[in-house]
Image (cartoon, rainbow, N blue to C red):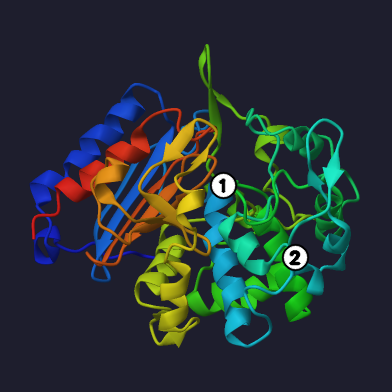
Amino acid sequence: MQIQVNDPEQFGFSTRRLERINGVMQRYIDQEKLAGIVSLVARRGSVVHLEKFGVQDFASGKPVEFDTIFRFYSMSKPITSAALMMLYEEGRFQLDDPVSRFLPEFKETKVWAGEDELADLNRPITIRHLLTHTAGLSYGGFEETGVPVDKLYDEAGFFDEGVDTAEMVRRIAALPLAYQPGQVWHYSMATDVIGYLIQVIAGMPFDAFLQERILGPLGMVDTDFYVPAEKLDRLAEVYSPSSDGLEPTDTAIAGDFTKPQSVLLGGSGLVSTASDYMRFCQLMLNGGALDGVRLLGRKTVELMTANHLPDGLLPIGMGPDVMRGYGFGLGFRVLMDVAQSGMLGSVGVYRWGGWASTIFFIDPQEELIAMLLLQLIPSGHYPIAEQFEVLVYQALVR
């Protein structure tokens, strides 16, 4: 999909200041810290910055294009959360309904209580707990979190041959929780459970639901759980740092997005493009509608992008990384205190990112969307996300 780029000065940006983004991104490319980047900034529904840097992969040397397909990993979570809230609007469930009402495998779930001890839950896991990452579920795998339950996640075989989404969720439910529900904000596979929950409530496959209710209506033609053969030449390679520079990330770690998936991960399974994801972001910023298509009510979007965590669960964080000034909504982290965050921004900004260093943020006060797409695992290896955020806001002059 072609994106029209407009005069930044007409939308409150300094053109000269906005061009600082280009210099910083190009340095990452020139120093071979990254292979390729796409950056996008939009305000009041119009794109004012869209640039591409570097290559899709070093082996071919093919330049990054605006329609390059990226693995979005955890940037799948907001789309999955929005899909669930569409069913909420239809009266299919209440946020505080027990998950076990729809997924009975969670009726017998226990919680880790130290050493080899397990305990009963002091309250059921609710759908709100899943949306806010307070269900007590975990992730495992990617890095040492200090949570003993993570080792069990690593050994559960969620992606073994023959495992489908339903079986993955059964295996998750059979593991103990890391914490009692509602006790701790702990990033987890909760949104993967939500994907299956959507399938059960809607009575149709999760990928078909997304296509029929979100991706199709929004014209997100390149967003899916895999890249079909005719589009593989547009898929960016994913890299990881090594002592010899950047190396392609092993498929066993990064996942194989070149074929249909037996396990549909609502939390990390989507590939997409800048133009596709921009349409989803604009839908959210518009209060649930885009180009005459309404997917969510305005009040539902307001609920999703408000903080749902009590003070006792703040600040949120992953391992040593503490996100001060932020709370968490229904699928997004939400900026509550600009000074505490230590970054430029506005109260009410909501955002998320992906494992391969993709990020986006939406600022309702400034009617602003910004997105940075690259493919480097793990995220956070370089401060490029923080730099990009500063570069966007410093260019906003009125």
- Is residue 92 among what the camera can see? yes
Q: Earlier in the sequence, mark 2 or mark 1?
A: 2
Residues 9 and 306: in front is 306
Q: Which label lies toward us, 2 or 1? A: 2
What quarter of the picture does the N terminus occupy? bottom left
Residue that label 1 marks: 233
Q: Secondary structure at mark 1?
A: helix
Q: Which residue type carries mark 1?
A: Asp
Residue most extreme to the right:
162
- From the top left corner, tell me how far across and down residue 331 is, in percent: 53, 61
Q: Which residue corresponds to the image point at 35% horizontal and 35% vertical from the top-left?
A: 384
Q: Quadrant of residue 167?
A: bottom right
Q: Secondary structure at mark 2?
A: helix
- From the top left corner, tell me how far across and down residue 201 is, in percent: 75, 78
Asked if residue 116 lies left or right of residue 315, the reply is right
Separation of marks 2 and 1 at Cα, in angstroms: 31 Å
Residues 102 and 384: in front is 102
